[in-house]
Amino acid sequence: MLNRLAQRAASATPPWAAAPRPHASPLVKTPVRCMVLGRRAPRLLSASERLKRFGRYELVLPGEAVLQGRTLRMSPLEVPEAIERPDYDRSGMPVVTLDEIHINTAAEIAGIRAACGLARKVLAAAATVIAPGVSTIQVDEAAHRAIVAAGAYPSPLNYRGFPRAVCTSVNNVICHGIPDERLLVDGDIVNVDVTVYLNGFHGDTSATFLVGNVDTAGRELVEATQESLKTALSVCGPGVPFSAIGNIISEFAGKHGYQINRDFCGHGIGRHFHQPPLVLHYANSEPETMEEGMTFTIEPILCQGVATYVKWPDGWTVVTQDGGRAAQFEHTVLVGPDGVEVLT
Ligand SMILES: [Co+2]
């Protein structure tokens, strides 16, 4: 749920998000590279090209509800008044007061741990309703009910105007898909991204699920993405540079022939949904190192073809430019004395 470009464009961009990044946005970079090499920008492949290169699945296109703005206007379920809300629940604008990586106190760790435990349970509850013929709104509502039943607020709801409790991203959707009336079909892969705000702390996790019988290429993509997250977790610990995460994911993805999306990053998390640092999933040489007591997410997105995106007119849903599939897995972690503890 963290877009580097949106962070930079917003007038209230926190200083930590405005620091120069090692790579410019691909939206800026791609045309230059294409001119130099004389190649065309990535295009949406035809159905037969996609079948040959990426396998058998339904391409997700913006439906009438998206084009008419209905997905943004449909009312989400209520959040009872008694539930503690984040600062953006009415304004839509989160205020991040941190400009460096926060080391949590024992009390803060306990709060984040509780939020993360709930996020894990909610993701599992949402997963039980996933099946062919179920709409992503039904998945969203299952998650929403589980969150408020536990006395928590669904963090994405009205975060920068996001209209629902969770993100649901199907097949060629990279991330930030808005739950809608589309029914899941046999062979889909769907990422459900759950963040909860419980007693003042956020916990964030996501997984990509198989709907019915997914073809081999789809299953391999999902397995490799989950494996890339595991690999990244194994190298983390106090004194380790954050760049180790992107470097190992990059090596892993390269070996398996997948592209890593560069526009959506992991992030610090705690009292704020998104706080320093940005956790890059591609090869980089950022200088910050992990310290005991830090909490952050790792959430790589691997793509079958190009990892660059097109954004739908809803302002949120981002899809691959060539129509290839994307998968994502995410955990919130706590840096401990000799490694990281997965809190979700
Ligand atoms: Co996240």
Image: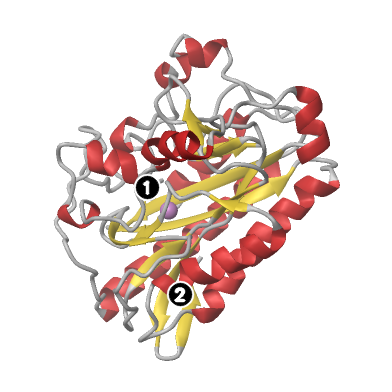
Q: Position of residue 272 (x, y in %)?
A: 27, 55
Q: Position of residue 196 (x, y in %)?
A: 41, 51
**Does the numbered disc 1 mark a residue whose Cβ is under 8 Å from ligand 1?**
yes
> Observer-nearest residue: 172 or 176?
172
Task: Locate residue 40: give its quadrant.
Answer: top right
Horizontal side of 118 relative to 12 (left or right) equals right
Give the Cα distance between marks 1 and 2.
20 Å
Q: Is residue 343 visible?
A: no
From the viewer's perspective, is residue 62 above or below residue 86? above
Q: Is residue 217 visible?
A: yes
* Identity, as a three-letter code, of the amino acid under mark 1: Leu
From the viewer's perspective, is residue 328 above or below residue 233? above
Q: Residue at x 35, y 86 (%)?
A: 239
* Identity, as a three-letter code, of the amino acid under mark 2: Ala
Residue that mark 2 sits on: 244
Q: Nearer the viewer, mark 1 or mark 2?
A: 2
Q: Position of residue 68 (x, y in %)?
A: 46, 9
Q: Position of residue 318 (x, y in %)?
A: 49, 33
Residue that mark 1 sits on: 2
> Observer-nearest residue: 61 or 197?
61
